[in-house]
Image (tube, rainbow, N blue to C red):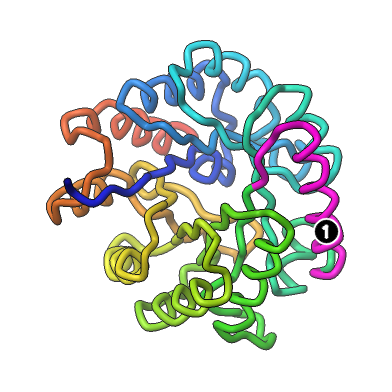
Amino acid sequence: MPEKITIVETPRDAFQGLPGFIPTEEKIRYVRALMEAGFREIDFGSFVSPRAVPQMRDSEELFRAVSKDSDGAQFIAVIANDQGLERAKAAGVPVVGYPLSLSDTFQRTNTGKTVAESWDLVERLQAGCRKSGIELLVYVSMAFGNPYGEPWEPEQIARAAGRLVDLGIHRIQLADTVGKADPDTVRAVFAACRAAAPGAALGAHFHARPDRWQENVFAAYRLGCRRFDAAFSGLGGCPFAEDELVGNTPTEGLVREMEAQGISTGISLHHLDKPLALALEIRQKYGK
């Protein structure tokens, strides 16, 4: 049997920084195309203030539409506070993700909280998720370096992963928020986290230039990572990290590279064309 990985398609991350609002009907069409292509995990939206991320203001409506014909696909929404969890509960979303940075600078910019305040929030969110039957996923932002001059080392990330597991949070995505990772750093971080949190399901969320993602992905894969976030055409990045959005790992490239290595993604190559065409159309229409 070939090795398997899970690719999480992330239209939320792809679309959130685009200047033009994508009509809800077009988002619905795109997510349905992802499900038709075989994607079983989709990071579709976020329950945050529309003032902070205007593109995500229709996340409830989008989820209502696509969850009706999900055919077993799992949907993920990002939240930034207790109110976001309440909205997710009301909508019936099964998985929520919280972005936890170990950089005070970035955490304040991204969620308006300090790192210490965010840890308190993570504990509350986990308690609320348990009561509601929702799974909490945590993105550890700036996992592969800190561009703000603050202290950083792989062991710091590993301690955070261990603390999350102690709280009962096992799905952890290590995020290269500003596209600074290199293979050596990726190996060091994953090795440290696997040692400190052996019970964690560690995934990777790499932001990178189009010519830089392969080495980091395979460095993580060789250290046991089997869950990768990606976006068709490499569109997206965090609008709160730096002035310029750094793209995502391109889904079409990730599928082709993995399948060429004999690693199963569950996605047929001939199913890539439709969502890729739609992603390029959205980039062209709403990225100006």
Question: How far across and down, in percent of the image, does residue 204 sit?
Answer: 46, 59
| Magenta segment main secondary structure | helix
Q: Vertically, is 204 above or below 269?
A: below
100 vs 261, left or right, is right
165 vs 125, left or right, is left
Residue 75 lies within the magenta run: no
| Closer to us: 113 or 14 | 113
Q: Kindly identify the residue that appears in the image at 17 percent across and 36 percent down.
A: 269
Which range of residues does the magenta coloring cover?
A: 115-136
Q: Is residue 288 visible?
A: no
Residue 120 lies within the magenta run: yes
Question: How far across and down, in percent of the image, does residue 93 sit?
Answer: 66, 28
Question: How far across and down, in percent of the image, does residue 162 sit?
Answer: 64, 70
Q: Kindly identify the residue that appears in the image at 35 percent across and 28 percent down.
A: 278
Q: Kindly identify the residue that appears in the image at 81 percent across and 61 percent down.
A: 118
Q: Vertically, is 67 above or below 104?
A: above
- Amino acid beneath label 1: Gly
Residue 23's quadrant in the figure? top right
Q: Secondary structure at mark 1?
A: loop
Question: How far across and down, in percent of the image, does residue 222 sit?
Answer: 30, 69
90 vs 191, left or right, is right
Q: Vertically, is 74 above or below 68?
A: below
Q: Vertically, is 65 above or below 92?
A: above
Q: Which residue is mark 1?
A: 112
Q: Kindly identify the residue that appears in the image at 31 percent across and 60 percent down.
A: 210
Residue 46's quadrant in the figure? top right
Q: How many C-alpha atoms fall within 10 Å of the one at disc 1: few (<14), some, or many (≥20)?
A: some
Please tell me how many numbered marks the rendered image carries.
1
Q: Is residue 98 visible?
A: yes
